[in-house]
Amino acid sequence: MGRTGGNGHRVLKRVLIGLAIVLVVAFVGISGFAGNYLVDYALTVNDDGTLGSMNGEPYTGVQDTEAQQTYDTWVQGRELDAWTIENEDGLELWAQLYPADEPTHRYVLAVHGYTVDHRDIAPAIVPFVEAGYNVLTPDERGRGNSEGDFLSMGYLEKRDVIAWANEICARDPEAEIVLYGESMGAATVLMASGEDDLPRNVVAVIEDCGYTSAYAMFTDQLKERFGLPEFPFLPAANLVCAARYGFFFSDADAEAALETCELPILFIHGGADDYVPTYMGEELYDAYDGEKELLIVDGAGHGASSDVDPELYYQTIFAFLDEYVS
């Protein structure tokens, strides 16, 4: 009886160990599959230029806004210029320059958001040009006319912002540059603002509806879009991203970049933003110890502050810039 019982225990132990191994392998396999899917969904640029999150639908560059209608009329007959550079990774990047009506050394480097290209931010730059700024609107890597196979939520794009700022300085050594970004572009210019080789010609930053970090943003979106918890899916996607593209989601951290920034920053966020939640803009503002200002536009959704209250939006911006741009 004792021997039979001992054998039974040993058999049961082996079965349980085998079952545990199967469960661990299944867990790792499912997590790896989910992580790979999420990286493709969020970051990978397809051959046709779309992202996985766009479901194969190309970005058309057309917005149903009054600002778009104003831009479409305003841009007719204007002489524009196209700039190209090669970035640190050997990618050819493209940008549209909107020159001011009169020669000036004032520039706005305007960085668009996630999934779109320079056409998305173009309607918002009209008041800058009319206020006497040259405005450069790059296509971020992997978007529009710029080369690239994936996005990095600002982590690598911040280096491209610095490359564009250096290009402005090479063409105009007296340039005064304002970094302006929306959404992912806002997070990107914040990350760039903390880089130690940012040209001294950059004098101020305006960020509109940027996120604190890509990891925090994806945690929120994983719940909102898929109804999934952070663990184990986001850590798995984080590891897949590092293996495939050489960076972690946690590397794209705008809030951390503020620790080494010394520029004046205007933080703008929509009060009804449920895509990059309003609290992220408030957290960024609270985290920064330098010269700063915060504008929350009541009733504005994501990226819509300039449409909901354009008078308040641009009055705040130009009053802020008057302090730092000659």
Image (spheres, grey):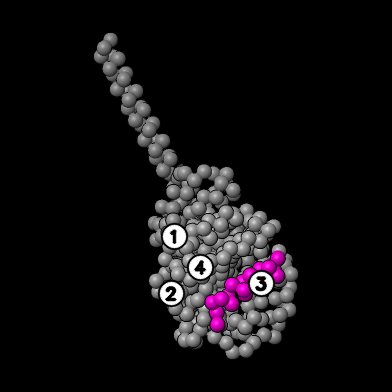
Helix, strand or loop at label 4? It is loop
Q: 27 or 224, which lies in front?
A: 224
Question: Which circle's residue, 4 or 1, is located before the other in the chain?
Answer: 1
Q: Main secondary structure of the magenta part?
A: helix
Question: Which circle's residue, 2 or 3, is located before the other in the chain?
Answer: 2
Residue 140 can be seen in this image: no
How far apart marks 4 and 1 lie (CA) works out to 17 Å
Question: Which circle's residue, 3 or 1, is located before the other in the chain?
Answer: 1
The residue beneath circle 3 is 315
The residue beneath circle 4 is 291
Q: Nearer the viewer, mark 4 or mark 1?
A: 4
Asked if residue 42 lies in the magenta stretch, the reply is no
Kind of residue indicated by mark 1: Ala
Kind of residue indicated by mark 3: Gln
Q: 57 or 264, which lies in front?
A: 264
Asked if residue 315 lies in the magenta stretch, the reply is yes
The residue beneath circle 2 is 198
Residue 256 is tagged as: 1
How far apart marks 2 and 3 lie (CA) works out to 27 Å
Helix, strand or loop at label 2? It is loop
Q: Residue at x 70, y 65 (%)?
A: 309
Kind of residue indicated by mark 4: Glu
Q: 40 or 233, which lies in front?
A: 233
* Residue 221 sits above or below residue 106 on the image: above
